[in-house]
Image (cartoon, rainbow, N blue to C red):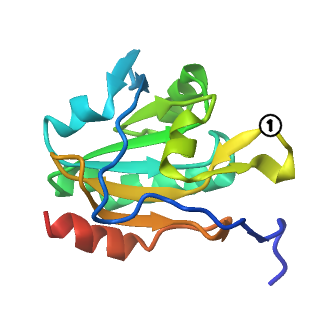
Amino acid sequence: MELEFDVVELPDSDPVTAGETAPDFTRPLVNDEYWEDASLSDLTDEGPVLLVAHSMDGAFPATYVWNEIRDREWGERFDAQVVGISVSDPYAHKRLIEERGIDHALFSDPAAGVAAEYGIGHDLDGMAGVTEFRPAVFLVDGDRTVQYAWTAQEWPDFPDYDAVEAALDEL
């Protein structure tokens, strides 16, 4: 099968791993009605959070990931709040939420500061100064301890959804 895109090996990174404390951050959190600044710790105070880092909205990997999460009904089936994060601005997130019927909120981090803190930033298509989130998933408990972590090693790459579900089941 001939792919319509190149599979690219991503450079080495030093991402947050299971057992570490997830760095706290505050960014605009967008849902289907509005957005407002929120912190990861605000969310973890309410319970576990599955933080899904994805490519910018409109890129097929972001669409694929959110379709899969929607179809697997993670928000309904598990005791964790599912939230996304990417470099896309709140307006783009609002469109993605509406177009894909996403029932989860998305953090907006256009400067990719959170990507740097989590060790999951990379230069988009090798362009210096244009940073994007490397696909990653972090299951964070109420104390902000990472219970599960996955980080892409190539682009595009997708999490093992069954492994994520197993980690969610263990909460």
Q: Position of residue 95 (x, y in %)?
A: 56, 27
Q: Is residue 53 above or below residue 14?
A: above
Asked whether 59 or 38 is in front, the reply is 38
Q: Is residue 106 left or right of residue 123?
A: left
Q: Quadrant of residue 73?
A: bottom left
Q: Quadrant of residue 160?
A: bottom left
The number of numbered discs placed on residues in the rendered structure image is: 1
* Quadrant position of the N terminus in the picture: bottom right
Report the residue that reaches farthest toward the bottom: 1
Q: Quadrant of residue 31?
A: top left
Residue found at x 20% / y 39%: 44
- Residue that label 1 marks: 129
* Quadrant position of the C terminus in the picture: bottom left
Q: Disc 1 residue type?
A: Gly
Q: Position of residue 47 (x, y in %)?
A: 14, 43
Asked whether 98 or 27 is in front, the reply is 27
Few, some or many residues within 10 Å of mark 1 (<14, 14–19, 20+): few
Q: Position of residue 147 (x, y in %)?
A: 25, 63
Q: Position of residue 103 (x, y in %)?
A: 34, 38
Q: Is residue 79 above or below residue 109?
A: below
Q: Is residue 159 left or right of residue 87?
A: left
Residue found at x 81% / y 73%: 3
Q: Secondary structure at mark 1?
A: loop
Asked whether 161 or 16 is in front, the reply is 16
Residue found at x 86% / y 45%: 127
Q: Is residue 137 left or right of residue 21?
A: right
Residue found at x 19% / y 57%: 77
